[in-house]
Amino acid sequence: MEGHTEHMNEQFLPVALATLQFERAAPCDLYRRIHDGQYVFFAQKGVLFDSAARDRVIASGADLLYIREEERALYNAYLKETLVSIVSNPAVSSNKKAEAVHAACLQTLQRTFEEPRAVFLGQACEILEPTVNLIISDDQATKHLIHLTTYDHSTYVHSTNVGIFSIALARILFGGDNQHDMQALGAGFFLHDLGKCKIPIEILNKPGLLNDEERDIVRRHVLDGYQMVENSGLMTDEARTIILQHHERDDGMGYPHNKGAEEIHPYARICRLADVYEALTSDRPYHNSRSSFEALKFMKEHVVSGPDEQLFAGFVKLFLA
Ligand SMILES: [Fe+2]
């Protein structure tokens, strides 16, 4: 029953309404945040969370509820299970599946960037699994996911978009070849920019050009991200390589190791292509966004050459109606 118990001294985490299943028991106690920043008890763990309750939240203009920090693991387990059941349910439309995994990806990556500790990285990888499964098995859901990618310069939105584009491209390139571990690749793609959590926000969002010192700090994100996932012991060599090499360039002018074309892993190439496209189509402090068509045209004329041409031909297919 909804009440007005206030909890002043606890940590709360937002959860997207779209990640909660209705007509099912609430996974943990749920709270609403009210205008003065306090949290009000809304629904009890284990009690049916019905559509009338959802409608009350929507009517209040919110699309988030809150859980207590101490129940985070409980919620994450519920979220994984919910996504698996939605993705595997033939009665749920592809578009609804895409919307559920998209909301979960955004929320999970936002939280991972805020608190990139090994335990949360592991939970994030678990939650991203059903998204990878959806993209490699459902064309309509993939099209809808690509349609759902929205552009701003938040690192977690960028990471969600690049993850979606990259897995979809990997599926086109590798098809049913089971030598490629798509789950492992998915973790690398979604978390390719994890090291950016160490960049001060004023540098990340600086309008205009970065000075040499600032550029060195930004460039460190590939080594920091690599080190973070290495320390966590959670990812495969290939996934770590994606993180490490996604800013290398065929002309040897990339970073961190100035690798040449033949040394850059195909998985990192996929991520780089998606990364460039996403950067061109999003509003950044230093440029306005291009349309999808303009971005692809620019890439064809100025970015793509050599080994990337075949990848790019596959990439373009993602945006055909
Ligand atoms: Fe990056």
Image (cartoon, helix red, strand yellow):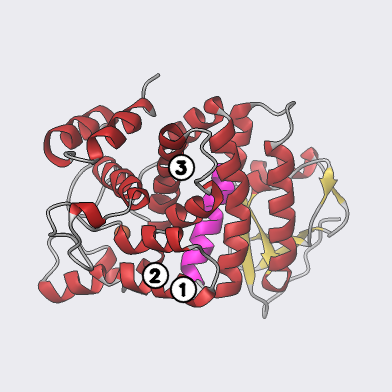
What kind of element bears circle 3?
helix
Give the amino acid type for the residue marked by disc 1 in the picture.
Glu
Image quadrant for the N terminus?
bottom right
Residue named by callout 2: 226
Q: Position of residue 178 (x, y in %)?
A: 55, 41
Residue named by callout 1: 230
Q: CA distance from mark 3 to mark 1?
A: 22 Å
Q: Are marks 1 and 2 in contact (CB under 8 Å)?
A: yes
Q: Quadrant of ligand 1?
A: bottom left
Magenta region: 102-115
Q: Position of residue 30 (x, y in %)?
A: 74, 59
Residue named by callout 3: 167
Q: Main secondary structure of the magenta part?
A: helix
Q: Residue at point 74% right, 32% down? A: 89
**Is residue 18 found inside the magenta-colored segment of the image?**
no
CA neighbours of label 2 inside 10 A, class few (<14), some (14 to 19), many (20+): many
Give the amino acid type for the residue marked by disc 2 in the picture.
Tyr
